[in-house]
Image (spheres, rainbow, N blue to C red):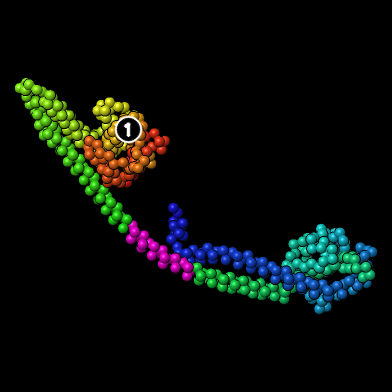
Amino acid sequence: MPRSILSWSDRSLAAQFALAGGVVMVLSMLLIGRVVAARIEESVVRNSALATSQYMDSIISPLSQDIAEADTLPPGARRALDEIFTNTPLGERVASFKLWKPGGLVVEATDKTIVGRRFEVTDSLARAFAGEVRAEFQNLSDEEDRGEHALGLPLLEIYSPVREVWSGEVIGVAEFYEVATGLERDLAEATRNSWISVALVFVAIGGVLFLIVLRGSRTIDRQRAALTRQLGELEALSTRNTALRERVQQAAARASAANDRALRRIGADLHDGPAQLLSFAALRLDALRGQLAETGEIDAVERAVKDAIREVRGISKGLGHPDIEDRGPCEIVTGVAETHEARTGTKVAVICDLPEGLALSQAEKLCLYRFAQEGLNNAWRYGGGRGQEIRLDCRDGRLGLWVRDAGPGFPPEDAERHEAEDYSGIGLAGLRDRVESLGGSLTAGNRADGAGAEIGMELDLRGA
């Protein structure tokens, strides 16, 4: 991220407001100051022009009536105008004079070289012919203004309509250039005062707003600091809780592993102890059969002993588990399904959809093994082994294992949880403890389609 952006985001709210608000206010002040100064200049120029126009109209209009019928003034009128603008106080105020007829014809002027010439009708001249008094200050860019521009004086250019006395119709326009040294000074002072006023108003507004924002910014900074401290405390507490949870899970996993070792020892003891003794008893019964005339009771006892042997060996086999350390998840559940098929003579469909190279811990592998074993035993015992299915997949970092059957399902009074016991003697309650010790969850109930029972487990592998 650019350094400028980082430095901006690191600033306080008050500093950001001061920078952004300062730029906006300066630009607004310049815009409003220019508008106010332009309006003041326009108002002062218009008022000065109206006053001067009324005075000049009273002098020029009586001498200019002849232009309504001719394109020139009579000699007497021309001489009178020359005398008015030469060596008189009015002549000192008016630097130049032009008398226009419609179409841009100069009828009379102080500069005799342009008398009788036609010039392009400017906007101000056209509006003056329409009966409006117009004025321009320091705008000598028109072609006919070359002589006045050469004077180098501040001039107020005034266009005053000349009306016919008896009809009031505009018959010409008197244009005169008043020396406006005083007006220039007054405009400069008015402009300066307007800029000072606008600046003071904006500074006052900006100062008040900055104080408000500064107070809010300090409050926000205090709250942010308090929240930061609380967040730090929460993070430390969360870290401690995570460590404690991991220790609890590790302890539960160790307890589960110890329980499995104890079960294996019990299975081995059953196989090597009671099973061997029962086998010896069965052999002795065969020997006794030849010594007794009545063997009916002997046969009954022998059958009971052999049934006990099968049960003990079955329990012993269920308590142990094959070597799964070097086997993948799919191999583990497939091996459980094959063992179950061989023992019960039923079919188990295995669906495994796992990403390539998914690695699990020994505790997680053992959890899959026990869960699949318990689920299939329940499916065979309570569902008659019909429609048995194991589904193993991994979505968004969560490993899921489901065991389904097409039997009658859980009874209505226990449709959500069923804690049966199989050869391992752990049941769903023991499975739940095993799954939850690894940070997972277990569900058991009837299938959504009502076609049997289903148990499922999920392990979150993202925090492994």
Q: In this rendered view, identify the residue nearer to me: 94 or 14.
A: 14
Residue 221 drawn in magenta: yes
Tell me which residue sits at (72%, 76%) in the image. 182
Residue assigned mark 1: 383
Can residue 362 be seen? no
Q: Main secondary structure of the magenta part?
A: helix
Q: In this rendered view, identify the residue nearer to me: 190 or 362.
A: 362
Q: In this rendered view, identify the residue nearer to me: 310 or 77.
A: 310
Q: In this rendered view, identify the residue nearer to me: 314 or 237.
A: 314
Identity, as a three-letter code, of the amino acid under mark 1: Gly
Residue 416 found in image quarter: top left
Q: Is residue 302 above or below residue 56?
A: above
> In screen coordinates, is 184 left or right of 255?
right
Tell me which residue sits at (94%, 64%) in the image. 69
Q: Which residues are magenta?
A: 214-236
Q: Is residue 270 above or below residue 52?
A: above
Q: Is residue 330 above or below residue 224?
A: above
Residue 113 position, x and y percent, is 84, 64
**Mark 1 Cα shell of 10 Å, populated few (<14), some (14-19), many (≥20):** many
Residue 444 found in image quarter: top left
Labels in figure, total: 1
Residue 51 found in image quarter: bottom right
